[in-house]
Image (cartoon, rainbow, N blue to C red):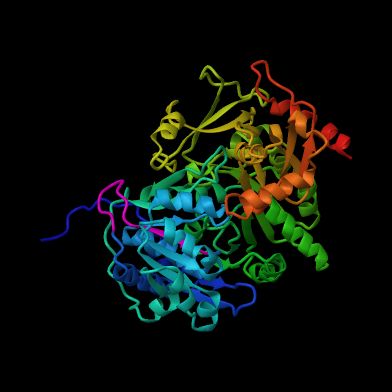
Amino acid sequence: MFQMFKEYQLTLDKILKYALYIAPEQEIIYSPPGHRRIMYTFKEFAKRVNKLGNILETLDVKRAYENWEMGSRVAIMDWNSIRYFELLYAVPMYGAVAYSVNIRLAPEEIIYTMKIAEPEVLFIHTDFVPYIKMIVDNVKSLKKIVVMDDSSTCENKKTSLNEIKTKVGNKDVYEYEELMRNSKDTYSWPELKENVVAGMFFTSGTTGRPKGVYHTHRQMLLASLQILIAQMEYPLRMSNRDIVLMLTPFFHIFGWMAPYYNVLIGNKIVLPGRYRWDHITLLVKNLIDEAKKVNGRVIAQGVPTMLYSIIQEAKNMGIKDLSGFLFGYGGEALPISVYEEAKSLNIDIVTGYGPSETLTAITRMIYIPRLWMKMGIDDKKLRDHFVKNNSLGVPIPLVLVKAINEEGEDVPQDGKTPGKILLYSPSITKEYYKNPEKTEKAWRHGYFDVDDIVTIDNYGCIMFVDREKDAIKSGGEWIPSSRLEGFISTHPAVAEVAVVAMPHEKWVERPVALIVLKPEYKNKVKEEDLREYLIKEFIDRGLMPKWWLPDKIIFVDELPKTSTGKINKRAIRSKLEEYIKDLS
């Protein structure tokens, strides 16, 4: 009997299958600093993904069969490596959930998020093995551990597991490349339903504890298509002749979805491994020459601090021209001084915006007709309009956006009237995992509320105004001001504290703490006393990342208050230069 119509399921295996048809010999380069560079064609990459299918089965990973079900959560702690890339395909294609662990969180918060996610298997780079005993002692769901290392992947050196085994008790421990060598390169992948959950990660904890979000195969595939359509428009005009250098950490929204949509169109991909900016800058320079041979460019994306680091290294190396390099930034505003430096090196700049909950860059710098029909087609003028006005971009295809006032009414699109941005898109998370209260609050308007304030101008461009909860973003990573205030306030001398952002040339923002001392401690406590206290009580104990330490601690007699008696951070920010000047 012949096969009848079968509904097409939007699952991630379709991306790889299509890529194997259009670009079987295209290359994925893994070039970690200090190690041998290795290369796989898409065809060879697919065989390694097949090997992982067999490995996941050997590890007793459970798969999901029904829509919105989750299979086993498979946690990944690694740099942007070929291994991570392989796992981002194999785990969801198997029917399990790829759970990318944010390695930049404080150890205590890594444990907090893992206890919520309840992974059964952990793939972990040797750089993060110091965390392993703490993880095993606290994450009771964990059953098996797979250790990964660049010496093994790139030079075929054996990774000793003896020390690790002494730290994990009765947990099974394996080595990644050894498992790969002993696995078949064919695998019969299951036919999954498109709304089986494919991936999970946690927000950066903007307003408190990180929140878990998850997305299905359908959402991840549609998100890939949405961003591709946007990036094929002006000014980005992406093509399969471009070489993609993947800088955005894979634990950040799966590298802003680049591992999926770039494979879908057949781009050459370069993975830099652990961040070393001299190494990455040389990669950019050398790849430009290669890309120009086929009229392509080198494309990378990340937070502004990454661009700043590349520019500084280029200057140190005497590089005067990086034409043929395009950098897409997001996460925070790009300092105008850095933008001008990028232009002086002939680096093309584009912008975008996409909170964790939305999965992809839900807005992007796109020259939509509403913009260019009014402003004209001068590229410099259009690009400056986005960057210099701190624009998030315009909605990518299929995204519905509006900004509302406190009464829930749409605000005018005049570029002046601020409102809370609400989003609706096929890629947005269904819920915050195990957090119904936050979920209900986010969806209460029918669109998703991410607690950001914006304006929308008459060209359709969305301009960022403020973060509703006053979080600080330093080097692309969130520092929740309320949590840092909580740590500082435990010192017995502190009566009141407010943490706000101070502009920083490299990191874009850094925290400044303003402190009112209790009367009995006035003139008895110094800035260094507070620093040493935070290090001893919180950083050394793994409760707070070291980079959260305020750059400045300023003692004041009083803090400005609102009419309801709350500390007025807006007033503090407006007078921050005066506070700092008084300090000096």
Q: Residue 66, percent across and down?
A: 25, 49
Q: Spot the residue most to the front.
A: 520
Q: Residue at x 41, y 30 (%)?
A: 440
Q: Is residue 308 magenta?
A: no
Q: 95 or 258, which lies in front?
A: 95
Is 377 positioned to the left or the right of 426 in the image? right
Image vertical order of residue 379 relative to residue 19, above or below: above
Q: Residue 24, percent across and down?
A: 44, 72
Q: From this viewpoint, is residue 224 visible? A: no
Q: Residue at x 46, y 78 (%)?
A: 162
Q: Residue 473, percent across and down?
A: 65, 44
Q: 25 or 558, which lies in front?
A: 558
Q: Residue at x 47, y 58 (%)?
A: 260
Is 62 positioned to the left or the right of 377 in the image? left
Image vertical order of residue 423 relative to residue 272, above or below: above
Report the number of discs: 0
Q: Residue at x 64, y 27 (%)?
A: 458
Q: From this viewpoint, is residue 251 visible? A: yes
Looking at the figure, which quarter contains the C terminus?
top right
Image vertical order of residue 584 relative to residue 308, above or below: above
Q: Spot the residue most to the left.
A: 1
Most common SS among magenta residues: loop
Q: Residue 422, percent across and down?
A: 51, 31
Q: Is residue 66 magenta?
A: yes
Q: Which residues are magenta?
A: 63-78
Is 107 positioned to the left or the right of 96 in the image? right
Quarter where residue 498 is shown: top right
Looking at the figure, which quarter contains the N terminus?
bottom left
